[in-house]
Image (cartoon, rainbow, N blue to C red):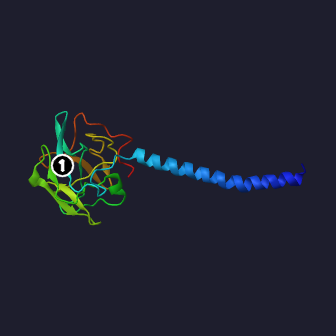
Amino acid sequence: MTNLTLSRQATLALKIGGPLAAAGILAAACSSGGSSSSSSSAPAAPSSGGTTSTATVDVHTSNGTSFLTDSAGRSLYLFGSDTSTKSTCSGACATAWPPLTAKTAPTAGSGATASDLGTISRSDGTKQVTYSGHPLYYYSGDTGAAQTNGEGLSAFGAPWYLLAPSGQQITSVSGASAPSGGGGGGY
């Protein structure tokens, strides 16, 4: 073969192979990015995506400390900068700390007091569940039932606490799961 023929074959290989290689790299990047993001986040909150019309607030007891959870046992938190009528957590904050929302009035499960339940309207129009005047949130760092990795973290300008059935914030949990990966300091 002549150098001209080799040059044309190499050029043809690059013209065909380059886009195929780029497509393969793009497919791999999209594939790994999607699985990475889903594996690092908490399981979807049952009522945060508008998929559940009613939210149920239960109470879980671990090592002598009782705190609020949803009906699947996922821990619920309060945000120190919220008021009884307004959530101050949106955008990136609401990604890390998804609000407990419901389309209808929330219900009290085992150990929760029905008269302490209510809702507020969020800036996006969704109804966020409140308990004793505190808007309720999940923590994306909790990946299973009764995990309390968000307890006592300071993120987005204020502390986050579990909530007792009495409506009071819990400032320490004995025997609770420790915050992993340094907690929420990087938010």
The quarter holding residue 88 reads bottom left
Q: Residue at x 32, y 60 (%)?
A: 90
* Residue 83 image position (x, y, % from top left): 20, 60
Foreground residue among 42 and 154: 42
- Label 1 neighbour load within 10 Å: few <14, some 14-19, many 20+: many
* Residue 161 image position (x, y, % from top left): 23, 47
Foreground residue among 132 and 9: 9
- Residue 179, compared with residue 158, is above or below; it is above
* Residue 109 image position (x, y, % from top left): 14, 46
* Residue 69 image position (x, y, % from top left): 21, 45
Q: Amino acid at mark 1?
A: Val
| Labels in figure, total | 1
Q: Residue at x 22, y 40 (%)?
A: 172
Foreground residue among 91 and 18: 18
Q: Residue at x 58, y 53 (%)?
A: 26
The quarter holding residue 111 reads top left
Query: Looking at this rendering, what residue extends furthest in the right direction?
Result: 2
Q: Which residue is mark 1?
A: 57
Foreground residue among 3 and 144: 3
Query: Judging from the image, what secondary structure is the residue with disc 1 in?
Result: strand
- Residue 122, compared with residue 77, is above or below; it is below
